[in-house]
Image (cartoon, rainbow, N blue to C red):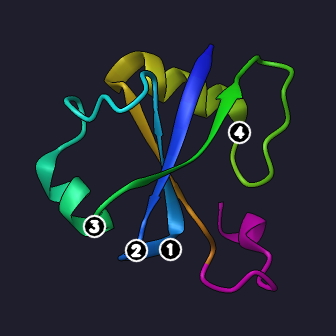
Amino acid sequence: MQCWIYKGPKRPDSYLYLDREDDFDHVPEALLKLFGPLEPVMTLELTPERKLARVDVREVMEKLQQQGYFIQHQPKDALLDWSAYS
């Protein structure tokens, strides 16, 4: 599964993954406003075996199939072990 990743100046630590290049039709307008003007970051080929740095690839693929987009939020404090709160 191919995906396109974008970022915006208002949320520099978050990323918007899309199932189609430059297709923001499925993304709620309020969410787009939170990001500000979006710019492309990269394109990835997702497979269940692929490892992503901060998110589970299967979750990303599921959200892309269900809603056409996925939001990756970066942790506020990279030193904090977030697994204790899951």
Give how far apart the Cα atoms at labels 4 and 3 are: 25 Å
- As drawn, the label of residue 36 is 3
Name the spot of residue 22 as percent of width and height, x first.
35, 33
Q: Is residue 24 left or right of residue 72?
A: left
The C terminus is located in which quarter?
bottom right
State the residue position of label 2. 9
Label 4 secondary element: loop
Name the magenta segment's main secondary structure. loop
Query: CB of mark 2 within 8 Å of CB of mark 3?
Result: yes
Badge 4: how crowded within 10 Å, few (<14), some, or many (20+)? few
Whether residue 12 is in magenta: the answer is no
Q: Position of residue 51 (x, y in %)?
A: 85, 36
Amino acid type assigned to the residue bearing label 1 in the image: Pro
Q: Nearer the viewer, residue 63 or 30?
A: 30
Whether residue 51 sits left or right of residue 73 in the image: it is right
| Residue at mark 2 to residue at mark 3: CA–CA distance | 6 Å
Q: Report the residue at 38% width, 19% height from top.
A: 66
Residue underneath mark 1: 12
Q: Nearer the viewer, residue 3 or 28?
A: 3
Of mark 1 and mark 4, the one earlier in the sequence is 1
Magenta highlight range: 76-86
**In the rendered structure, which disc, 2 or 3, sits on the residue that comes first in sequence?**
2
The answer to the question of whether label 1 and label 2 lie on touching residues, with beta carbons closer than 8 A, is yes
Residue at figure coordinates x 44%, y 16% from the top left: 65
Residue occupied by mark 4: 56
Q: Are marks 1 and 3 in contact (CB under 8 Å)?
A: no
